[in-house]
Image (cartoon, rainbow, N blue to C red):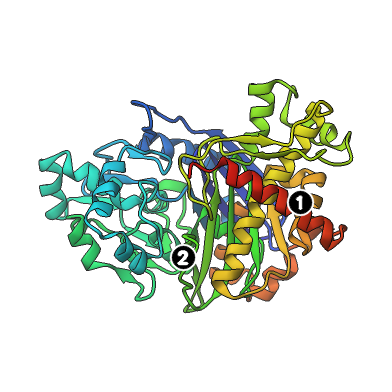
């Protein structure tokens, strides 16, 4: 029986809660996962039950602890990563939620954002928070809940109501209501946090009539955050790491130097570039966000979201029926040497960064009599890589930092053809780690640093292992020709 100390890393995502035990080499020892239910009260609304989130999370925590040789004594610390922006309000006395949790995807608070824009306040919000105002972020969700219930607002002003993102909610429950905190990465996604001053913005709280008494204390991402209550897990365990999912993935990819970047390929894609100790203002409407605070130093990142990447492959399967399952796309695309002049802009729900055209529509150009399903499949993969290139070039321009390589994770990072296309179109290496579950790994790293399982970031970097490095293989002339074809197709897809 081993007595090796382990990190218990909780990854509370939009569709599931997962718990992983991680050893001092950054390897997974055990894991458990269970789905989370989403609620759709009406079109565009996405809610969850915070009680359900906690019950499922606690259940998977107990599953891995029950299976652990040597028991709970082997857990050195807990790390948490979470779906960002999802908003929970609960009673400070009873610990019970007072409203459904509004999920980050929900558009039910869009009118509040429209009002901010109508009042000419959008630029001020971006200047303070680094965020382009959107219903995505927590601020409008809090305001919407308070605006709809006069009694709830009065209780919030009296200090009886707590607000938290999912990290706050889990820490509250793990500590049996003793600790109401959030970390700086999650705070920076609320649209209420001054990312340069490192404090809640009194100005923006007043603008949205949100009582400061509701808000959690803001702490660093690594260190002494809280201690679990013995009644919850059986003994007190220090919680020493916490970060929002995308920042956690950036840390899990060991992107510790300015200019290091990661791309998470999922249904959509999230790109983050570490920019060091300076918060870079974006001219491309990218988001400026706090990456993390570790060892007393705050570091920042630029973030760009792409709405449709993996879901474009799902459309090939469900909409066109040219593949039976998503995993077949690589073999189909490899059956032709190139796209045959076809370019596909998957603006199936508008175009995100850096184009920002919500009314753009999906467009396929260059179709001829010789076009086959294989050409369209290959063009779909190329579109995923092209969209990522567009965001990364905007980041390079904003940060005045040249990208040296791109680190990749998420499900589609397993697609070798896509990764080679990405390297070819960027003109820099694409690096896939041995463990692509970098979100939960980042939470483990942060907690391990906080608990001194790792002495410093260099130890973390050494435990990050490369699976494969994709080097660019095409000539500059071919790269430019493909980019010109893509940009022409994007112009055709735009609404203006």
Residue 302 image offset from top left, x and y in percent: 53, 65
> Local crowd at mark 2 within 10 Å, few (<14), some, or many (≥20)?
many
> Local crowd at mark 1 within 10 Å, few (<14), some, or many (≥20)?
some
Dot 1 falls on a residue whose secondary structure is: helix
Instruction: Please give the name of the residue rendered at 23% of the width and 43% of the height, measured from the top-left corner.
Output: 144
Task: Check the image and report above or below for 199 versus 410.
Answer: below
Q: Viewed as shown, does residue 184 lie left or right of 200?
A: right
Residue 325 image offset from top left, x and y in percent: 73, 26
On residue 288, the disc is: 2
Instruction: Give the number of callouts.
Output: 2
Circles 2 and 1: CB atoms closer than 8 Å: no
On residue 482, the disc is: 1
Residue 39 image offset from top left, x and y in percent: 39, 28
- 380 vs 206, nearest the viewer: 380
Instruction: Please give the name of the residue rendered at 42% of the width and 60% of the height, measured from the top-left corner.
Output: 227
Task: Check the image and report above or below for 279 versus 487.
Answer: below
**Disc 2/disc 1 C-alpha distance (Å):** 30 Å
Residue 163 image offset from top left, x and y in percent: 28, 51
Task: Check the image and report above or below for 463 versus 277.
Answer: above
Instruction: Please give the name of the residue rendered at 53% of the width and 43% of the height, measured from the top-left corner.
Output: 494
- 256 vs 124, nearest the viewer: 124
Discs 2/1, front = 1
Query: Can the viewer see residue 404?
Result: yes
On residue 26, the disc is: none
Q: Viewed as shown, does residue 242 lie left or right of 67?
A: left
Q: Name which of mark 2 and mark 1 comes first in the sequence.
A: 2
Place residue 455 in its image quadrant. Answer: bottom right
Query: Can the viewer see residue 29?
Result: no
Dot 2 falls on a residue whose secondary structure is: strand
Q: Viewed as shown, does residue 328 lie left or right of 211?
A: right
Q: Viewed as shown, does residue 475 lie left or right of 485?
A: right
């Amino acid at each position: 029986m081993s007595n090796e100390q382990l990190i218990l890393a909780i990854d509370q995502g939009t569709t599931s809660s997962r718990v992983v035990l991680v050893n001092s080499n950054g390897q997974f020892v055990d894991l458990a996962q269970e789905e989370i239910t989403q609620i759709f009260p009406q079109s565009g609304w996405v809610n969850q039950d915070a009680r359900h989130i906690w019950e499922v999370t606690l259940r998977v925590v107990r599953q891995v602890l029950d299976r652990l040789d040597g028991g709970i004594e082997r857990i050195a610390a807990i790390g948490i990563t979470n779906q960002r922006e999802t908003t929970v309000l609960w009673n400070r006395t009873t610990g019970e939620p007072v409203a459904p949790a509004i999920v980050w995807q929900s558009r039910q608070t869009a009118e509040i954002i429209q009002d901010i824009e109508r009042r000419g306040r959008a630029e001020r919000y971006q200047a303070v928070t680094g965020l382009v105002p959107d219903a995505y972020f927590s601020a409008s969700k809090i305001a919407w809940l308070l605006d709809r219930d006069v009694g709830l607002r009065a209780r919030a002003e009296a200090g009886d109501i707590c607000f938290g993102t999912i990290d706050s909610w889990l820490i509250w429950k793990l500590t049996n209501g003793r600790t109401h905190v959030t970390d700086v990465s999650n705070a920076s996604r609320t649209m209420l946090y001054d990312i340069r001053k490192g404090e809640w913005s009194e100005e923006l709280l007043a603008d949205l009539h949100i009582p400061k008494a509701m808000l959690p204390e803001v702490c660093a991402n690594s260190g002494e955050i809280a201690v679990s209550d013995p009644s919850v897990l059986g003994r007190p365990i220090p919680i020493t790491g916490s970060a929002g999912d995308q920042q956690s993935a950036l840390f899990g990819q060991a992107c510790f130097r300015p200019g290091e970047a990661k791309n998470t390929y999922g249904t959509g894609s999230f790109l983050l570039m570490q920019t060091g100790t300076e918060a870079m203002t974006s001219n491309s409407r990218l988001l400026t966000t706090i990456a993390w605070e570790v060892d007393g130093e705050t570091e920042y990142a630029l973030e760009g979201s792409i709405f449709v990447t993996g879901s474009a492959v799902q459309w090939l399967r469900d909409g066109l029926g040219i593949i039976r399952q998503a995993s077949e796309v690589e073999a189909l695309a490899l059956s032709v040497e190139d796209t045959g002049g076809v370019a596909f802009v998957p603006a199936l729900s508008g175009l995100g960064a850096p184009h920002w055209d919500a009314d753009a529509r999906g467009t396929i150009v260059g179709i001829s009599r010789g076009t086959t399903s294989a050409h369209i499949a290959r063009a779909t993969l190329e579109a995923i890589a092209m969209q990522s290139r567009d965001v990364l070039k905007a980041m390079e321009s904003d940060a005045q930092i040249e990208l040296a390589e791109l680190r990749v994770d998420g499900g589609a990072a397993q697609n070798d053809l896509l990764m080679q296309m990405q390297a070819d179109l960027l003109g820099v290496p694409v690096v896939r780690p041995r463990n692509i579950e970098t979100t939960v790994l980042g939470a483990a790293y942060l907690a391990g640093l906080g608990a001194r399982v790792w002495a410093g970031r260099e130890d973390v970097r050494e435990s990050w292992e490369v699976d494969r490095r994709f080097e660019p293989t095409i000539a500059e002339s071919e790269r430019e020709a493909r980019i010109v074809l893509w940009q022409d197709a994007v112009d055709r897809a735009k609404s203006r």
